[in-house]
Structure formats: structure tokens, C-alpha cells
Amino acid sequence: MTETAQSRYVHSVQGVAGYSPANHTGTSNQRLISRDTVGAKYIEVLIGTIVKGHGASRHFHPGLEQAGFMFQGSGISEIDGVVQEAGPGSWRHYRKGVPHRITVTSDEPVKTIVVYAPPYAESRDAVVVCEDDTSPGYAANSTEGEGRPLTERPRLDSCVDQGVQYVPIINAELSGAEHMEVFGVSLSGGGGVVSPALHGLEQVLFVRTGVLSGQINGDTFNAVPGDFIFIPDGAEHAYSASEGSKAEAFLIRAFS
């Protein structure tokens, strides 16, 4: 690893032990952002690896939502009864109470980012395995007031940015998300973001290309492709791409 590992806010899969998640076969997860690893309150992020012929049982989460981005491999994905092929480069969003599963069909193992909001932490109370749509809680509507109202969520324009472009991928308008948002972020050389403390919000940046450097609560960091940057609730922060070199990232936001 590079010096990026020296910052407590930057994390990578190197050296992170895997575990076998419940209701899956042929799967190894590496938990990077969670209550246990960084004290996260609103979000959990992990890397999952699934081998051919294996995957998840059909299940849903009554009280949390999930999203995933596939790096490599391919499989058959089912979301709320809709079956389709899933391949690299695609995000998927699973609302509360919506059944989903995936089975890997490629010789190459699937590798995927998995996001939970609120955190899952393998809680038995947070998952229901269902072979049909009669299980209690299926497609249950969220309790009124449970999701933070859109008008109260910290906006991207709360920050000062230059040379930065955001493309919404998952949010309330696009996919019915209540507790998370995902953006594709492109930074020109030297482009970056300066943000005040934003409360009731945790953020994770996943660096896809280039190098991001910055500060979080006064702690300096450098992050390279494959690194995850955790920005805690209420943290002042700034980050930018290297001069003369573009950078791309995913920005994942989770709300109280």
C-alpha cells in the first residue's frame, strides 16, 4: 500500500479479512465502512466477491435500502420479480421491502461494491428470506417521517467546488431512495471541493481514477484508485484532483 493507509479516513480492501455473509453461498465480503470500522452511523460499505454458480438467496430488507456497483464478472439479477443480466459498470438500487437476488454466471468472479443505509451489520432482524411474495414486510412502505425529507437534506451546492461535475445515479427522484444518494463525480486537474460541516450526513468517496488529496477535520490524506474515503457526520473537508491530472470517483451520501 501507499501512504494513503496512514490516514484514518482512507481505507482499502488490502489486509481486510473476509467473511461469509448469511443467506449467500460462494461469497466473501470485506467490510470497509461500518460502525465497527469507522464508527459510521448512517452507512455501511463493503466489497463482495462471488464465484460462479453462487450468490444470494431471494431476500429483502424491511428497514434498510441497498445499492451495488459491479466491477467485474456477470450474473443474473432479480429485483422485485424483474430478471435481467447484470454486468460490469452498472449500479443497482434495492428499496426497502423489495426482494432481490443475484447468481453469478461468469467464469470470472463477480466483484461488487455493496452499500447499506442504514447499516446492516448482518443483523437477523434486518433481512427476510423469501421464496415468494407472501412474507410479512414485503414491499412495505416506509413509516411516515422515517426518511429525512428532501428539503432538509444537505445539498451539493452547500459546498464550494470548481472544476467538478456531478451525475446523479441513485436518489429519491431517480430510484425512490430514502436514505442514500450516489453520484458519479468528475474532477478536472486541480479541480476540487471545499465543504463546511454538514450535519446529519455521512459521505464516502470511492476513487476510480486519478489521485484525490485533501483534508478531513484537519487530517491530510492522499487517495488512489480503489481507495474509499470516509467523511464523518459534521466533518469539515476539502479534496481535489492533482494538478494537470483528472480524477473520477463515486460519491455516496447517507442521511440520518
Image (cartoon, helix red, strand yellow):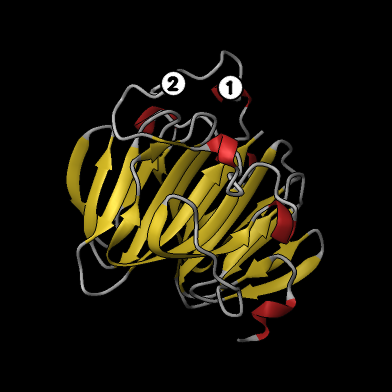
Q: In the depicted view, which residue is nearer to us: 191 or 33?
A: 33
Specify the quadrant that holds the C terminus.
Answer: top right
How far apart marks 2 and 1 lie (CA) works out to 31 Å
Residue 134 location (% of width, % of height): 33, 21
Question: Which quadrant would residue 50 be assigned to in this image?
Answer: bottom left
Q: In the depicted view, which residue is nearer to us: 18 or 189?
A: 18
* Residue at screen point 50% across, 56% down: 21
Circle 2: element type = loop
Q: Is residue 126 above or below residue 223?
A: above
Residue at numbered disc 1: 151
Residue 188 location (% of width, % of height): 46, 66
Of labels 2 and 1, the one closer to you: 2
Specify the quadrant that holds the N terminus.
Answer: bottom right
Residue 11 falls left or right of residue 38: left
Q: Is residue 37 visible in this depiction of the protein? A: yes
Q: Is residue 12 above or below residue 234?
A: below
> What is the three-letter code of the residue carrying label 1?
Thr
Badge 2 or badge 1: first in the primary sequence? 2
Q: Is residue 166 visible in this depiction of the protein? A: no
Residue at numbered disc 2: 136
> What is the three-letter code of the residue carrying label 2?
Pro
Circle 1: element type = helix
Residue 48 location (% of width, % of height): 44, 63
* Residue at screen point 26% across, 55% down: 103
Q: Are marks 2 and 1 in contact (CB under 8 Å)?
A: no
The residue positioned farthest toward the right in the image shown: 218
The 10 Å Cα crowd at callout 2, few under 14, some 14 to 19, many 20 or more, is: few
* Residue at screen point 70% across, 65% down: 9
Q: Which mark is residue 51?
A: none
Q: In the depicted view, which residue is nearer to us: 119 or 3?
A: 119
